[in-house]
Image (cartoon, grey):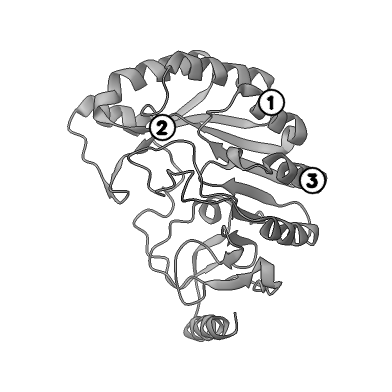
């Protein structure tokens, strides 16, 4: 699989929901923040200089509540890049319709997270999902995803059946206790339900030691944080810092370099051809990556 150039951008840490199980702890509109106008304009400069078509994932918090969400989407649309976004789907359907109209087939994926702690009426959520399924571009992949809790199994089984009838993809995430350890489900029916609909985006990297594996992260993939900081991926390692958009010192690497982390949680690199599975760097290449990482720590 050839790598598809991609980057992720955290545009807000605010969220209009307050889920007790939130792994990002972005459940406050009071203490959290949106990325600033300065960061936005700086990212625009990067977008202007991208070569070819890139896959851009907007992240939060809840990205749809950023006051400039549609200006950001306009920029991505005008430059012909593709967009992916996961939302709690709490806003009126017109917001998602506008998103689809601006991007057309370049809205590659929209994920609607169902949070039963917060959703007052599941019927209304499903009706909105059905309406969006009808109005979106036929090339846009649309999915409803939720965290599986044992006590919610009967409700989620019904939701799954209803969405199946509407040809809307429905998947489950394994509940993580304190955002880390996977919960041990006891009922075999619940285990089977999870297995049949489990999100598959971590299968390639789960429990795999990728230290020394060549990867395009830092070259054809990078992550932009809320305040403009740019990192190679999510996994802290020696070769990690790549500057800040506000300082105009972003320095991508020109070719794939070895991963210097034993654990990988970057789903986009894994699924968009960034990781060269089975291709290990030699000791000289690893040493150079370590040198490059230490140099960046000092200079950036």
Q: Vertically, is 180 above or below 70?
A: below
The x, y position of residue 113, in whole percent, is 47, 32
User: Which of the marked residues, 2 or 3, is nearer the chain's N terminus?
Assistant: 3
Side (left or right) of 258 relative to 117: right
Residue drawn at x 38%, y 43% is 22
The residue that mark 1 highlights is 97
The x, y position of residue 137, in whole percent, is 71, 27
Q: Nearer the viewer, residue 284 or 184?
A: 184
Camera-side mark, 2 or 1: 1
Q: Nearer the viewer, residue 26 or 136?
A: 26
* Mark 2 nearby-residue class (10 Å; few <14, some 14–19, many ≥20): many
Give how far apart the Cα atoms at labels 3 and 1 are: 19 Å
The residue that mark 2 highlights is 146
Residue drawn at x 71%, y 39% is 70
Asked if marks 2 and 1 touch (Cβ < 8 Å), the reply is no
Residue drawn at x 44%, y 51% is 204
Q: Secondary structure at mark 3?
A: loop
Q: Is any atom of residue 216 visible in this view?
A: no
Q: Secondary structure at mark 2?
A: strand
Q: Mark number for residue 80?
A: 3
Q: Secondary structure at mark 1?
A: helix
Side (left or right) of 20 relative to 287: left
User: Which of the marked residues, 2 or 1, is nearer the chain's N terminus?
Assistant: 1
Asked if marks 3 and 1 touch (Cβ < 8 Å), the reply is no
Give how far apart the Cα atoms at labels 2 and 1 are: 22 Å
* Mark 3 nearby-residue class (10 Å; few <14, some 14–19, many ≥20): some
* Mark 1 nearby-residue class (10 Å; few <14, some 14–19, many ≥20): some
Q: Nearer the viewer, residue 196 or 98?
A: 98
The image quarter in which residue 191 lies: top left
Report the residue that reaches farthest toward the front. 30
């Amino acid at each position: 699989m050839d790598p598809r150039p991609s980057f992720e951008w955290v545009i807000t840490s605010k969220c209009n929901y307050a889920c007790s199980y939130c792994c990002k702890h972005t459940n406050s509109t009071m203490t959290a923040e949106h990325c600033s106008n300065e960061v936005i304009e700086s990212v625009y400069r990067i977008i202007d200089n991208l070569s070819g078509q890139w896959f851009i994932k907007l992240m939060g918090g809840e990205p749809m509540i950023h006051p400039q969400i549609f200006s950001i989407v306009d920029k991505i649309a005008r430059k012909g890049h593709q967009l992916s976004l996961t939302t709690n789907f709490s806003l009126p359907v017109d917001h998602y319709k506008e998103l689809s109209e601006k991007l057309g087939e370049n809205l590659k994926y929209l994920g609607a997270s169902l949070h039963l702690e917060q959703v007052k009426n599941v019927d209304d959520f499903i009706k909105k999902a059905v309406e969006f399924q009808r109005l979106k571009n036929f090339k846009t992949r649309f999915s409803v995803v939720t965290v599986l809790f044992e006590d919610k199994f009967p409700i989620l089984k019904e939701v799954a059946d209803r969405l199946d009838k509407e040809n809307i993809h429905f998947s489950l995430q394994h509940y993580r206790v304190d955002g880390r350890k996977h919960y041990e489900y006891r009922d075999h029916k619940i285990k089977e339900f999870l297995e049949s609909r489990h999100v598959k985006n971590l299968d390639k990297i789960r429990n795999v030691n990728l230290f020394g594996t060549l990867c395009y992260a830092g070259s054809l993939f990078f992550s932009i944080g809320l305040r403009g900081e740019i990192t190679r991926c999510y996994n802290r390692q020696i070769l990690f810092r790549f500057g800040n958009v506000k300082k105009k010192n972003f320095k991508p690497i020109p070719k794939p370099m070895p991963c210097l982390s034993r654990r990988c949680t970057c789903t986009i690199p894994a699924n968009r051809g960034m990781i060269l599975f089975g291709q290990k760097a030699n000791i000289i290449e690893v040493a150079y990556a370590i040198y490059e990482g230490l140099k960046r720590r000092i200079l950036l």
